[in-house]
DNA sequence: CAAGCCGGTAACTAAACAGTTACTTGATGG
DNA sequence: CCATCAAGTAACTGTTTAGTTACCGGCTTG
């Protein structure tokens, strides 16, 4: 997200500015707007987010926002795309095929849960986008190919497990991923209403750890022979 | 939701109006506003919902809306409360303890999935409310006690299953319910982004039926000995 | 049968909103 | 050292919004 060093350095050839570059730093401003927008959209949704609020959070003004991103909708789409790129990039670094199939699936489940836990804004953005029936995501050309890798790798691990006789033959890669994602997403994104109606603070570390173990247990129990 | 028959009949003692009671029917107007608001809030969230749109959908005007419900926030809370009352009421009619523990849990899973499937507006409202960290639900006095029944009954079924030796000793009622709800909620509420990124139409009957079976399978696999 | 009350209408208001325009500043290259 | 140009500011505009007010009309009841 903060790539202010690289691209900026190319333009500023002589006298690299170095000290007090707060003013007149386009990359920095751009990144600040994107981060502020991520928070604002995550907290208030598309309808509730305020362009003025984003500009203020970013320490700049609306003029710059419209200059870099066109309008509110394009900015929102950019935020959403970056969020997806974030999780899929982190996922690729996992290499779930390196250990035993069982460990591989467990690792994917743990990773997904912890990523969700550390990136609540990603969950919020997904919620908002689904409220609008993926209206903006569908327009994105960048994201279509980003997800095939995940299913491909997961599919390989499952096949290996089936050959070894540790997984049931009916285990389906998309179903397994959806199971993992479901258990993490629902618990975290609905924690507020759930904590309220059941009178238990679900975000407490004890409950959080218990649910982490539960996710791994459920995922493996559903595919093991 | 549509209780226009009962309360209305008490007031109109003589000459029961009967024919063409469209005009000047407070109960009907109130119900129409509530239903229109449910759809508007479900489709657009709290920030995106428009009071004018609700009035128009209800075939009335803003004056009546403010007259019956105070303001936008109180109307929203009423909508949310009614939605919770709806699912918890339907749940009570289940009596999951009547059959074997295994069948009881399977029945609860099926019921929850099908209720979610038939009431997409309930899922949307939950999403909206959680985006705002249960800000309005927490103010509700009506809903605190509504949910203890569910956990109580589920707890009994699990205990029975443990005694019979069909369920594992560590099975927890809240975890079991959250598992069932997770699998249904995520699949349906996130169907739009999921269908987009995985290139599969998740709402197709074939996939819907497969997921229904999957939910029951996963739930039981996670608690069976 | 008239008075008033209640369900209902529509035009209005002040504030908030997305998006624009006119202007300032300061670094750079000729 | 000055002309240029891009980064950045702030005040403005037309529109949309939640909420209000002034008014209408017909049913009920004394």
Image: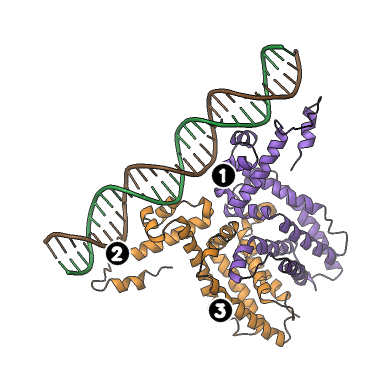
Chain colours: A purple, B orange, C brown, D green
**Label 1 Cα crowd, 10 Å radius (few <14 / some 14-19 / many 20+):** some
Residue A214 in the image: above or below residue B195 = below
Q: Looking at this view, is D20 or A50 the one in front?
A: D20
- What is the spatial separation of the Cα atoms under label 3 and label 2, in whole angstroms? 37 Å
**Label 3 Cα crowd, 10 Å radius (few <14 / some 14-19 / many 20+):** few
Residue B200 in the image: above or below residue A161 = above
Residue B25 in the image: above or below residue B171 = above
Q: Are marks 3 and 1 on the same chain?
A: no
Where, by quadrant of the figure, is residue A8 drawn? top right
CB-based contact (under 8 Å), mark 3 and mark 2: no
Chain of the residue under label 1: A
Q: Which residue matches tag 3?
A: B94
Residue B61, position in %: x, y? 37, 53
CB-based contact (under 8 Å), mark 2 and mark 1: no
Q: Which residue matches tag 1?
A: A50
- What is the spatial separation of the Cα atoms under label 2 and label 1, in whole angstroms? 44 Å
Q: Which residue matches tag 2?
A: B21
- Circle 2: element type: loop
Residue B175, position in %: x, y? 68, 72
- What is the spatial separation of the Cα atoms under label 3 and label 1, in whole angstroms? 45 Å
């Amino acid at each position: 997200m903060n790539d202010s060093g690289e691209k900026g350095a190319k333009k500023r050839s002589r006298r690299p500015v170095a000290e007090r570059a707060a003013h007149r730093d386009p990359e920095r401003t751009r990144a600040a707007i994107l981060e502020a927008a991520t928070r604002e959209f995550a907290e208030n949704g598309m309808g509730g987010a305020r362009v003025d609020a984003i500009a203020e959070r970013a320490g700049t003004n609306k003029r710059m926002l419209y200059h870099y991103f066109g309008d509110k909708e394009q900015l929102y789409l950019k935020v959403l795309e970056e969020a997806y790129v974030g999780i899929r990039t982190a996922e690729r670094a996992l290499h779930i095929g390196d250990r035993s199939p069982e460990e591989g699936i467990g690792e994917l489940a743990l990773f997904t849960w912890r990523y969700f836990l550390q990136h609540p804004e990603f969950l919020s953005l997904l919620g908002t986008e689904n409220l609008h029936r993926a209206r903006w995501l569908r327009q994105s050309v960048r994201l279509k190919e980003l997800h095939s890798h995940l299913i491909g790798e997961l599919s390989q691990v499952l096949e290996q497990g089936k050959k070894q006789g540790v997984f049931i033959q009916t285990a389906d890669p998309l179903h397994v991923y959806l199971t993992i994602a479901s258990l993490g997403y629902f618990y975290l994104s609905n924690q507020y209403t759930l904590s309220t109606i059941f009178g238990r603070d679900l975000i407490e570390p004890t409950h959080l750890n218990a649910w982490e173990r539960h996710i791994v247990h459920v995922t493996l129990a559903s595919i093991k022979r």
